[in-house]
Image (spheres, grey):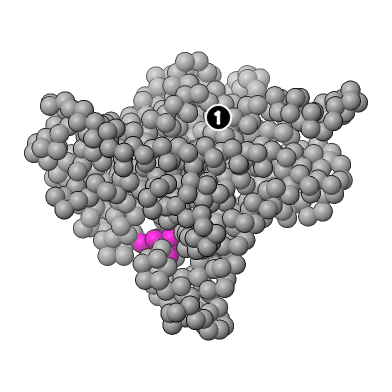
Amino acid sequence: MMRSPKQALVMTLYILFLMVPIYWLINMSLKTNTEILGSFTLWPRDLTLDNYRTILTDPSWYMGYVNSMIYVVENMVISIAVALPAAYAFSRYRFMGDKHLFFWLLTNRMAPPAVFALPFFQLYSSVGLFDTHIAVALAHCLFNVPLAVWILEGFMRGVPKEIDETAYIDGHSFGSFFVRIFMPLIASGIGVAAFFCFMFSWVELLLSRTLTSVNAKPIAAAMTRTVSASGMDWGVLAAAGVLTIIPGALVIYFVRNYIAKGFALGRV
Amino acid sequence: MDKTLNNKAWFLVAPVLVLVAFSAVVPLMTVVNYSVQDTFGNNQFFWAGLDWFDQMLHSERMWAALGRQAIFSAIILAIEVPLGIFVALNMPKKGFWASVCLVLMALPLLIPFNVVGTIWQIFGRVDIGLLGYALAKLGIGYNYTANAFDAWVTVVVMDVWHWTSLVALLAYAGLQSIPEAYYQAAKIDQASRWSVFRYIELPKMQGVLLIAVLLRFMDSFMIYTEPFVLTGGGPGNSTTFLSIDLVKMAIGQFDLGPAAAFSLMYFLVILAISWVFYTVMVNLDKAEGK
């Protein structure tokens, strides 16, 4: 099909709708508070990087990013590591209760985090994990592991079973087959699953805020600090927001060729 | 694909099982535990039977929150699914601009939920936000913190902004899998644009669209952070959805019993609806496999 001007117009309008609020945030982050509150300007007249400077020089701010990054990466590694063998089992074998187990796993993706906030708090407090990165990483496994299993299963289904059989005939053990032959074949699937784990762990706030206080406080929770006695510090708030968008944008850029298939959970 | 019967596959599933049991079953049991007990402090608990469930079933507050939630999810699905399909149909098929569109469209999906709330909180303010300011200049009285209707519109537009791309990307993935030959055949048959959509594109997108509806339903039904940051559930209770109400009850007021009973019923509602979607999806997969 040919691209018509009408199509280009629709896309331009839609992308504009998506970008304008983000532009506004960036715009605000480059203004001084006096300019934000004093006059209404479409672009910063008095360009300043002070808001960013505040964040990047204050440990209580920038440690938020470090903390978020640590638990997101931990969660990604744990989720993929346990989901890989499970997805293989679901895609290759029938076994007792497999369908029920698969649905039960998915139900965890459907569980409202609000339901789990308080029990998680008590569980992790009682085992002494409260306010650690690993606690948040484990809590996020609740929705990321089922999702990773679901995505990986979709990708693995596309690999013909004959490859497994040939590898066994060639004398590969299960472990060596899985790591040397099978994983490279579904590398894009692993990338997509990791992307989704990153995404949902990075954007989640309710659980990560409930499970941390000081040492592992995520950036999203740190942003509530900008409300102070002297009113909102809009500039710093906007700058912190802009900085949370950057990791996501970088990750999207790397997986852009797989995004479409990935969003279909490998099921196209 | 034919699968071999092999119960040893359980060993491969075991790690997931242990992990999810730790992070889902244990907390869920705590909730069940609270839902049937009452406490007067000092960690002394008394058996309360099903009283809390009974109380919550007759609670106007819960029914009101459920009603708002149902309306919200219905509006979200009614706007985002058609709009997402429409956008996907207009996306460039390949090349540089396809990549640009993909990256820009995926961007809102990777913004932390509270930042999404913050963006719209700023954007909608009459004094410093572009949207609020522009509307005020046009003479439309708009104030999402005071007017319930404005608050609803803002929350809905925010969600459309945030998640329509997910539907669009899924539909786009479905469209990508249609071989060019189908379109050529349709051209030879002189099929109209509508019949191409109805008989070629829509059936091919069915599978991914179900995933989209399922994901959008689940996530809109559990929505918490964005409206909480934007409106805090207000003005009044007008945008207090189920999760917001639940967190208020459990952590704000520490009414553990009712909150737990509420949680379980909330979970069951989502589970029941999702199960229907899931069954349809699995049957569709089977039908396609044959």
The answer to whether residue A144 is visible is: yes
- Please give the residue where the numbered disc 1 appears in the rendered image: A260
Image location (x, y in percent) of residue A118: 47, 63
Identify the magenta region. B240-246
Q: Is residue A109 left or right of residue B259?
A: right
Q: Is residue B26 left or right of residue A120?
A: right
Q: Is residue B25 above or below residue B140?
A: below
Image location (x, y in percent) of residue B262: 49, 70
User: Residue at position x 48%, y 77% from top?
Assistant: B43
The answer to whether residue B218 is visible is: no
- In the picture as drawn, the residue positioned furthest to the right comes out as A169
Towards the viewer: B72 or B201: B72
Q: Is residue B32 above or below residue A115?
A: below
The reply to whether the magenta stretch includes residue B241 is yes
Image location (x, y in percent) of residue A88: 74, 38
Q: Three-letter amino acid code at disc 1?
A: Ala
Q: Is residue B269 above or below residue B122?
A: below
User: Residue at position x 40%, y 71% from top?
Assistant: B254
Label 1 resides on the chain identified as A
Quadrant of the rendered image containing residue A39: top left
User: Residue at position x 40%, y 47% from top?
Assistant: A215
Q: Residues within 10 Å of mark 1 (few under 14, many from 20)?
A: many
Examine the residues drawn in magenta and state their main secondary structure.
helix
Q: Quadrant of the C terminus of chain B?
A: top right
Q: Quadrant of the N terminus of chain B?
A: top right
Number of marks in the rendered image: 1
Q: Is residue B53 left or right of residue A153?
A: left
User: Residue at position x 81%, y 45% from top?
Assistant: B9
Towards the viewer: B167 or A188: A188
Image location (x, y in percent) of residue A145: 61, 45
